[in-house]
């Protein structure tokens, strides 16, 4: 694929319109994937579906590795370089949740349809998209459904894949179902942590200053909130959930806090982790209770500069589609690719709402803009227009 970047960008409207005939295939894949429960570490049925789709498309080197990732290769005419196109296969929803999808002429609604059933469906449909548009690539396309991405999965799937994939990866594209216009090219430093409180069974409730698990947890939260947080570079602490107690009048003896620290400043997350660990230790000593801190997941900050050719190419692609870029750092697969020095971006395919809620909804028609965007980016990478000279 030796076309110039302007010619690739100018072909986007034609490609978008030419993709309309694959609508039913894409939506069928999205709905079938969406109706397969796939919480983190339980993605095997969804991965099997993806593997079967790859087999039907006649792809090469189809495999499911020890981490449960599903990989397949669409070989290029030269095959000297590998472009990784990946989407995470897990969702935040438990297997007991009703995963039935509801479709109208304009939308699909159901748990995880945007995050990330549609993204995975795009990976499954990409061979037909490439064929429909008559695209011939020089580079190999490595298609990957990645497991163990979210929460405690801590990107274990993509890490395992990159550790064991025998060929170098030239560039990467991470595909999310929502939102169209998303442009992530940096990874934000991140820590997901838990604080667990347990009041010992021999605890003296009559002593002065005795406190139950709720009041102790409140003290921990208040002290964390007193930590000075810089406004630039952007840094924040998010309290995600607090759990304790069983009734109105029973003294709670256990409590749990889940939180996330994010910062664009190198080293800031590690600094805040130290301060939180000190708060936990101090509060445990003061209250004579068992308080533990555990890190569930961590990411390092980094990324491509704004002027990198891949970022420039994406801005031109979105401009042609009349889509305003929404620049945001990532804590997903992109962060691992960046950490390993692989130029990569994360993009979204369509408009959506109610992310990570039971009525998560995507709009169907904008998806074709999203797919045309993905195709144009693949062409640009294959043509060498995203290489940093």
Image (cartoon, grey):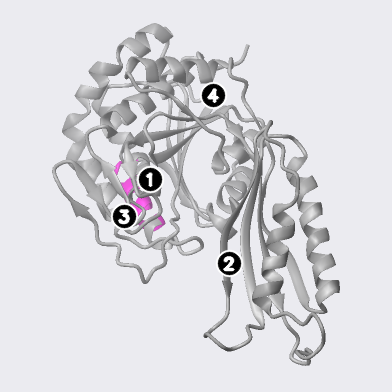
Query: Distance between the Cα atoms at labels 3 and 2?
Result: 29 Å
Q: Which is nearer the N-term, disc 1 or disc 2?
A: 1
Say which residue label 2 marks.
242
First of labels 4, 1 by sequence position = 4
Mark 4–mark 1 contact, CB under 8 Å? Answer: no
* Magenta span of residues: 47-58
Identify the main secondary structure in magenta: helix
Numbered disc 4: secondary structure: loop
Distance from label 4 to label 1 (Cα)?
A: 26 Å
Residue beneath label 1, please?
Answer: 120
Q: Which mark is residue 34?
A: 3
Foreground pick, 78 / 316: 316
Alpha-carbon span between mark 1 and mark 2: 32 Å
**Residue designated by label 4:** 80
Q: CA–CA distance between discs 1 and 3?
A: 9 Å
Specify whether residue 352 is in view. Answer: yes
Q: Residues under labels 4 and 3: Cα distance? A: 35 Å
């Amino acid at each position: 694929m030796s076309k110039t970047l302007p010619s690739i960008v100018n072909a986007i409207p034609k490609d978008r319109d030419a993709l309309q005939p694959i609508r039913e295939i894409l939506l069928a894949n999205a709905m079938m994937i969406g109706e397969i429960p796939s919480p983190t570490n339980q993605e095997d049925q969804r991965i099997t579906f993806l593997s079967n789709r790859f087999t039907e498309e006649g792809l090469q080197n189809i495999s499911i590795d020890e981490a449960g990732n599903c990989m397949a290769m669409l070989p290029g005419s030269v095959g000297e370089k590998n472009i990784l196109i990946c989407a995470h296969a897990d969702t935040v929803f438990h297997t007991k949740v009703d995963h039935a999808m509801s479709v109208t002429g304009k939308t699909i609604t159901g748990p995880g349809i945007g995050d990330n059933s549609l993204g995975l469906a795009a990976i499954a449909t990409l061979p037909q998209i490439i064929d429909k548009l008559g695209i011939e690539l020089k580079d190999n396309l490595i298609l990957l459904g990645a497991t163990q991405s979210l929460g405690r999965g801590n990107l274990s799937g993509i890490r395992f894949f990159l550790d064991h994939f025998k060929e170098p990866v030239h560039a990467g594209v991470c595909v999310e179902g929502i939102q169209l216009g998303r442009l992530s090219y940096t990874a934000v430093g991140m820590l997901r942590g838990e604080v667990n409180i347990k009041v010992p069974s021999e605890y003296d409730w009559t002593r002065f200053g005795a406190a139950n698990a709720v009041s102790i947890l409140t003290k921990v939260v208040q002290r964390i909130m007193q930590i000075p947080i810089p406004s630039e570079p952007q840094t924040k602490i998010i309290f995600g959930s607090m759990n304790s107690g069983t009734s109105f009048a029973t003294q709670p003896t256990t409590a749990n806090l889940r939180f996330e620290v994010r910062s664009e400043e190198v080293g800031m997350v590690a600094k805040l982790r130290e301060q939180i660990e000190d708060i936990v230790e101090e509060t445990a000593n003061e209250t004579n209770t068992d308080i533990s801190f555990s890190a569930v997941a961590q990411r390092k900050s980094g990324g491509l500069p704004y002027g990198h050719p891949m970022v420039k190419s994406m801005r031109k692609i979105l401009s042609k589609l009349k889509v305003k870029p929404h620049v945001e750092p990532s804590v997903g697969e992109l962060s691992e690719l960046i950490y390993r020095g692989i130029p990569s971006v994360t993009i979204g395919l369509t408009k959506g709402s109610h992310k990570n809620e039971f009525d998560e909804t995507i709009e169907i028609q904008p998806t074709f803009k999203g797919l045309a965007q993905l195709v144009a980016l693949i062409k640009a990478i294959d043509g060498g227009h995203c290489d940093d000279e």
